[in-house]
């Protein structure tokens, strides 16, 4: 069986020079970790899976101290307390923003989906305590807990290096006075291959600075009408449980959801989550708005089996479609101050996402 990530292969070869491939072939845990680490690649569209990976790592971290190569003692162990593990993994890089579903169900569900023939869950859940099943720790007579932790630590190190590359790019963009170069650099980040959370942050920064130049008139009577600038707000971090809302606009009350073009079932789910309140979809695609809308309407027709009442409900809930094309066009229409605002907003919200120090937003 081919090892996907080269750094995983390198570590296994160091630990088990003569048996590395055999151990990998016979380890569901190593195979699972290997397949979950695609986010180290610059053009990865996958999420980082830190919740699942840290759930495993937190258990193995304490296991190494308490039970490494101690089968007899481990077989009578009842597990590590939930809060003990959560406190640890939220202290790790990028861990503070993670939700706690992984320990309770996510890892075991993903594990069984990947390995349908297994007899036991990876994580044993014992009345609020958690431990890794011994079958997945010992492979060909070897306790692989340490090598698993080495692999996870290497993965996190590669992510940290990748994360700081964007910080360096943003720093260079802030220093240059050539605004055509700034536009070019922003467009280089704004691609179909951009990581999902990076695309969400960049699209927010562009939309925020685009809409703030648009004014509307609001008031409860003719005498109280005011001229107001549109304001866009993020609802939280990029992996937040936001109920189908990534950005909200004041004072007109628009909802925005960032998504990918090939997940039309997700579009309808987002619409259902907000009770069919109209949503503007910001889509990571270079396809035209007209193409996406036509595809989406075709999907709605197929999904609803042509039931008019359902088709109308979903179509009315699509307020607008914004693609990379619109975002790039709006960048060219902004002045230098707004371009600097985009770069600053990307910097602020990216550092917030990564729990790095950043200036407070003005």
Image (tube, helix red, strand yellow):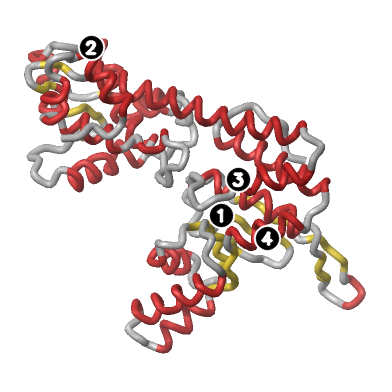
Q: CA distance from mark 1 to mark 2?
A: 43 Å
Asked where in the image residue 269 lies, by quadrant, the reply is bottom left
The quarter holding residue 85 reads top left
Q: Earlier in the sequence, mark 3 or mark 1?
A: 3
Residue 124 seen in this snapshot: no
In the rendered image of this protein, does residue 258 appear above or below residue 68? below
Counting residues from the N terminus, which is met first, the one under dot 4 or under dot 2?
A: 2
- The x and y percentages for residue 49 are 37, 38
Instruction: Decide which of tag 3 and tag 2 comes sooner along the chain.
Output: 2
> Helix or strand or loop: what does disc 2 sit on?
helix
Q: Which mark is residue 66?
A: 2
Residue under pointer 4: 249
| Disc 3 versus disc 2: nearer the observer | 3
- Disc 4 + disc 2, Cβ < 8 Å: no
Mark 2 is surrounded, within 10 Å at the Cα level, by few (under 14), some (14 to 19) or many (20 or more) other residues, namely few
Disc nearest the viewer among 3 and 1: 3
Q: Earlier in the sequence, mark 1 or mark 2?
A: 2
Judging by the rendered image, the residue that carries numbered circle 3 is: 188
Q: Of all residues shown, which one is farthest toward the right? A: 223
Q: What x and y, as percent, mark residue 65?
A: 26, 10
Answer left or right for 358 relative to 340. left
Q: Characterize the local packing of mark 3: few (<14), some (14-19) or many (20 or more) Cα atoms within 10 angstroms.
A: few
Q: CA distance from mark 3 to mark 4?
A: 27 Å
On screen, 145 above or below 331?
A: above
Q: Measuring 19% from the left and 12% from the top, which residue is drawn there?
A: 68
The quadrant holding residue 119 is top left
**Number of marks drawn:** 4
Q: Nearer the viewer, residue 221 or 308?
A: 308
Q: Which residue is mark 1?
A: 246
């Amino acid at each position: 069986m081919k090892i996907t990530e080269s750094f995983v292969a390198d570590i296994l070869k160091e630990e088990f020079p003569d048996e590395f491939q055999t151990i990998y072939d016979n380890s569901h845990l190593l195979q699972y970790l290997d397949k979950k680490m695609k986010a180290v690649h610059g053009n990865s569209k996958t999420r980082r899976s830190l919740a699942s990976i840290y759930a495993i790592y937190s258990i193995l971290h304490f296991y190494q101290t308490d039970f490494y190569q101690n089968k007899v003692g481990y077989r009578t162990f009842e597990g590590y307390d939930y809060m003990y593990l959560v406190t640890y993994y939220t202290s790790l890089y990028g861990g503070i923003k993670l939700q706690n579903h992984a320990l309770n169900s996510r890892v075991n569900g993903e594990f069984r989906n990947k390995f349908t023939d297994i007899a036991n869950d990876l994580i044993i859940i014992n009345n609020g305590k958690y431990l890794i099943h011994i079958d997945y720790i010992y492979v060909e007579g070897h306790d692989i807990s340490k090598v698993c932790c080495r692999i996870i630590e290497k993965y996190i190190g590669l992510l940290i290096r990748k994360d700081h590359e964007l910080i360096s790019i943003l720093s260079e963009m802030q220093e240059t006075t050539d605004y055509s170069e700034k536009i070019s650099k922003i467009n280089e980040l704004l691609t179909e291959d951009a990581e999902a959370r990076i695309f969400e942050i960049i699209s927010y920064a562009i939309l925020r600075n685009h809409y703030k130049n648009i004014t509307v008139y609001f008031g409860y009577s003719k005498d109280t009408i005011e001229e107001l600038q549109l304001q866009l707000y993020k609802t939280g971090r990029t992996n937040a449980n936001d109920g189908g809302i990534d950005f909200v606009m004041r004072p007109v009350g628009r909802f925005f959801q960032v998504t990918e073009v090939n997940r039309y079932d997700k579009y309808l789910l987002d619409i259902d989550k907000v009770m069919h309140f109209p949503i503007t979809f910001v889509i990571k695609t270079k396809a035209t708005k007209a193409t996406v809308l036509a595809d989406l309407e075709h999907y709605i027709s197929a999904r609803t089996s042509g039931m008019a009442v359902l088709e109308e409900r979903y179509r009315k809930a699509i307020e607008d479609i914004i693609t990379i094309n619109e975002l790039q066009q709006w960048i060219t229409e902004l002045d230098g101050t707004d371009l600097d605002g985009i770069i600053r907003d990307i910097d602020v919200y990216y550092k917030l996402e990564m729990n790095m120090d950043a200036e407070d937003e003005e």
